[in-house]
Amino acid sequence: MKKIYWVALAMIGAAIYMLTMAAEDLSTYSTFAEAAQSGKKVKVAARLAKDKPMVYDPQVDPNRFSFFATDANGEEHQVVLLAAKPQDFELSEQIVLTGRMKGDAFIATDMLMKCPSKYKDEEIKVRAKIGSSDN
């Protein structure tokens, strides 16, 4: 067999592997209840429960941050993020957690914060400029 066939076969195999990995990441959002039932790694869209305690002590464990979140069904659970506390975490309006349930806690390995509030000041300034230029 020629080398070009081996190279082509390797490239096809690599492409299939990459598509398989990407398909796992294209999952839909779950709830805490669905995460508990499946036992698999899922993504949960939730809101931060700002009235509950947040615990982060980098002296003890810099890769452990715990807080409470409420999912789309209104179910609240403790979340343990296996990473450092993100900057401006308290300002986030929605978070997407990737992980699995372990007992009553959701163990998250990754988190995406959605903070549209940080753009509101810019939006107000832009609207103010547009409004003043109309006069």
Image (cartoon, rainbow, N blue to C red):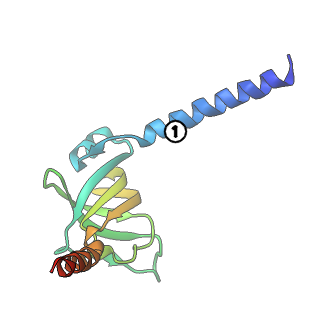
Q: Height in image: 35 above or below 131?
A: above
x 19%, y 73%: residue: 50
Along the viewing direction, whichever of 6 and 121 lies nearer the viewer: 121
User: Which residue bears the numbered disc 1?
Assistant: 21
Residue 92 in view = yes
Is the residue marked by circle 1 packed among few (<14), some (14-19), or many (20+) residues within 10 Å?
few
Q: Height in image: 112 above or below 134?
A: above
Q: Position of residue 70 (x, y in %)?
A: 19, 59
The amino acid at mark 1 is Met
Spot the residue most to the right. Answer: 2
x 47%, y 83%: residue: 59
x 34%, y 56%: residue: 97
Spot the residue most to the front. Answer: 135
Q: Is residue 1 left or right of residue 87?
A: right
Which of the 4 image quadrants contains residue 104? bottom left
Q: Height in image: 76 above or below 15?
A: below
Along the viewing direction, whichever of 64 and 47 lies nearer the viewer: 47
Quadrant of the frame with the N terminus? top right
Q: Where is residue 36 in the image (x, y as percent from the top left)?
A: 27, 45
Q: In this view, does 46 lie to the left or right of 62?
A: left
